[in-house]
Image: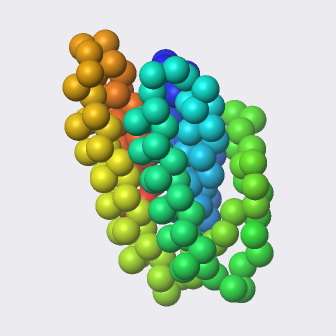
Amino acid sequence: MPQVVTRLDQMQALCVGSGAYVVDCLAERIEAIEADASNMAGYNEMHQILQQAAKELRILARNNRDPLQPRAKLSSKDGQLSSRPLVAVAPSRRRAAQTQAVKILQEAETKLLRSSTQSVERANQYRQVAQALGSNKVLLRS
């Protein structure tokens, strides 16, 4: 579980300078983290919440894509690479898409916090994941 929180915290390193690609960058990073989390026994609900958030962000990026921008793979200074080419959001739709992306992350945070009632240890872990996920909303407000 600590690796999931760490990886969520590290999303900013790849997505911070991604500009028009930020929505799909967040989707791709959450997809990668969710794929790793899917192997963790007893965390099905977290897996489903992350999977849904990633899917919604990816659809949001695609529905608002900029046809003038190529799909692009990103890399960060700390060695992270996007696992797939990312879609840019059109400038005229960027603010609305980023506002919607914040709502998607907030909804995932809320779901994680509500799902954390199973045990004290699991509740703390879900809260950490929710907090780490929520910390990435700053990327959408810049």
Q: On the rendered structure, is 28 left or right of 137? A: right
Horizontal relation, residue 48 to residue 89: left or right: left
Residue 72 vertical placement versus 52 (above, below): below
- Rendered residue at 54%/69% (across/down): 59
Q: Quadrant of residue 70?
A: bottom right
Residue at screen point 54% across, 80% down: 64
Residue 21: give x, y in percent of width and height.
Answer: 61, 65
Apparent side of residue 21 relative to residue 1 in the rendered image (left or right)? right
Q: Evaluate whether residue 128 shows in this view.
A: yes
Q: Is residue 10 visible?
A: no
Screen quadrant of the C terminus:
bottom left
Q: Where is residue 94? Give x, y as percent.
A: 48, 76
Above or below residue 140? Residue 34 is: above
Q: Does residue 32 lie above or below 121 as drawn?
A: below
With respect to residue 3, does 34 lie above or below? Answer: below
In the shown orientation, is residue 48 left or right of residue 20?
A: left
Where does the image place residue 34, in percent across and percent down from the top left? 56, 39
Quadrant location of residue 133? top left
| Residue situated in front as seen by the camera: 106 or 37 | 37
Q: Residue 51, percent across and down?
A: 51, 48
Q: Residue at x 45, y 53 (%)?
A: 53
Instruction: Examine the image and state in which quarter residue 79 appears.
Output: top right
